[in-house]
Image (cartoon, helix red, strand yellow):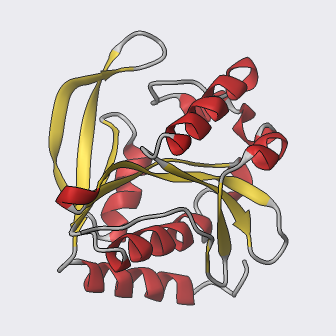
Amino acid sequence: MMRLEPQILENAHVRLEPMAEHHREGLRPLAAEQELWDWTSLRGDGPHFDGWFDMMLGQQAAGRQISHAVRLARSGELAGHTAYLAIEAEHARVEVGWTWYGAPWRGGVVNPACKRLMLGRAFEAGALRVELKTHGRNERSQRAMTRMGAVREGTLRSHMQTWRGDRRDTVYFSVLADEWPAVRDGLDARLHSFAPGA
């Protein structure tokens, strides 16, 4: 059976710390861009940040989620957030989501470094399937998942309501345990192209 528990995950590029109250003020300014929340069900920018942060902590306290504050290994700066969601131990299935980064760290080493840690730990813990999902119109996220080697499974139409009140189509991707070695090797090759701690 899959056993995922909060713990620090780190490599040469990032350190993922189980999110706690002491991360609140460090993450607040990073979450201020409304663009980060364009495709989500809940806003976390500006006056909405505390509600989002409290929900993340509440889901974690209830055992339904493990949130991580993303910290740069070299400088110690906070860069964003990522989480394990929909933790289904009996089905050896988990989702990696609620992932966002401040503007300076999008499109570089941070996301592949985080995915390498998150997926690696999930499969080490006994996962047979790791899910990722995104808004049907979030092409940047879909490109990142495809580049990582995740398999695009399909679209759930009118799947969720966004904070704006409109309905969103949700695109699902996944990586299965027997696919992980190839995905891992691809991520490792990408990370090798970056200087440690970049």
Q: Would you place residue 184 above or below residue 41 in this image?
A: below
Residue 31 sits in which quadrant?
top right
Q: Position of residue 89 (x, y in %)?
A: 27, 58
Residue 6 left/right relative to 27:
left
Residue at image coords 36%, 12%: 166
Residue farthest along the top direction in this orientation:
165
- The residue closer to the viewer here, 191 or 10, is 10
Q: Position of residue 84 (x, y in %)?
A: 44, 54
Q: Position of residue 26 (x, y in %)?
A: 82, 47
| Total number of numbered discs in the rendering | 0
Of the 4 image quadrants, the one containing the C terminus is bottom right
Of the 4 image quadrants, the one containing the N terminus is bottom left
Q: Would you place residue 48 above or below residue 5 in this image?
A: above
- The residue closer to the viewer here, 10 or 144, is 10
Residue 66 left/right relative to 44:
left
Residue at image coords 51%, 24%: 42
Q: Position of residue 51 (x, y in %)?
A: 65, 23
Residue 79 left/right relative to 110:
right
- Is residue 108 in sight in this rendering? no
Residue at image coords 69%, 87%: 195
Residue at image coords 48%, 17%: 163
